[in-house]
Amino acid sequence: MRIYLPATAAHLRASVLGSSHQPLTAHAATPALAQALPEEDEEGLEVSASLCAADASVVLLAEPEAVGLADRRIVIAADVDAENVRELPVEGDVLPGTIEVTGEISWEDVAALLVDEPEAQDDVRAARLGDEDAFERAADADLLWYDVTEREALAESLGV
């Protein structure tokens, strides 16, 4: 199952992502997302899930431990066993397609890295500080695709 994991530059240096003790919140093309977006095909659902993860990346960047990290949204697209995925009920701030992933995700499971281009940094920086207009502008920006083999170089270019 393809999942979209919101991330920060610091995640690019992790040896593995997640653990069996601490489930990760991610996004995927789930039945709830398909029901919420009935006009979308599978590809459209995947794009929607990746965009939700990109929005969630801004939330991660607003956390105190993210101070000093690059102001760029990062989404890690990975393939995991469906048995390690639990769809969260849609309520409150939980969007359709939001999932919990248990277990480790190795870099061998990662299909691609999606990252903001440098020009998005000002909007992402303002969004992480609570500027709703900047959040909307950042959400409209396309993410660049990187192969997982570019992870180390990407991390270095982002200052981690």
Image: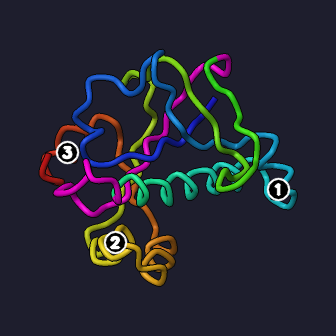
Q: Label 3: which residue?
A: 155
The verdict on residue 63 being magenta is yes
Q: Position of residue 14 (x, y in %)?
A: 26, 30
Q: Residue at x 36, y 56 (%)?
A: 115
The verdict on residue 34 being magenta is no
Camera-side mark, 3 or 1:
1
Contact, mark 3 vs mark 1 (Cβ under 8 Å): no
- Quadrant that contains the N terminus: top right
Q: Residues within 10 Å of mark 2 (few under 14, many from 20)?
A: some
**What kind of element bears circle 3?**
helix
Camera-side mark, 2 or 1:
2
Report how far apart the C-alphas of labels 2 and 1 lie in the structure. 30 Å
Q: Residue at x 56, y 27 (%)?
A: 101
Contact, mark 2 vs mark 3 (Cβ under 8 Å): no
87 to 46, vertically: above or below: above
Indicate left or right for 137 with 116 as reference: right
Ranked by sequence position, the earlier of labels 2 and 3 is 2
Ranked by sequence position, the earlier of labels 3 and 1 is 1
Q: Residue at x 62, y 50 (%)?
A: 49
Indicate left or right for 25 with 15 as reference: right
- Quadrant that contains the C terminus: top left
User: As shown in the figure, which amino acid type bears the numbered disc 2?
Assistant: Leu
All told, the count of numbered labels is 3
Q: Which mark is residue 129?
A: 2
Ranked by sequence position, the earlier of labels 2 and 1 is 1
Q: Position of residue 110 (x, y in %)?
A: 43, 31
39 to 74, vertically: above or below: below
Q: Label 1: which residue?
A: 36
Start and end of the magenta stretch? 62-83
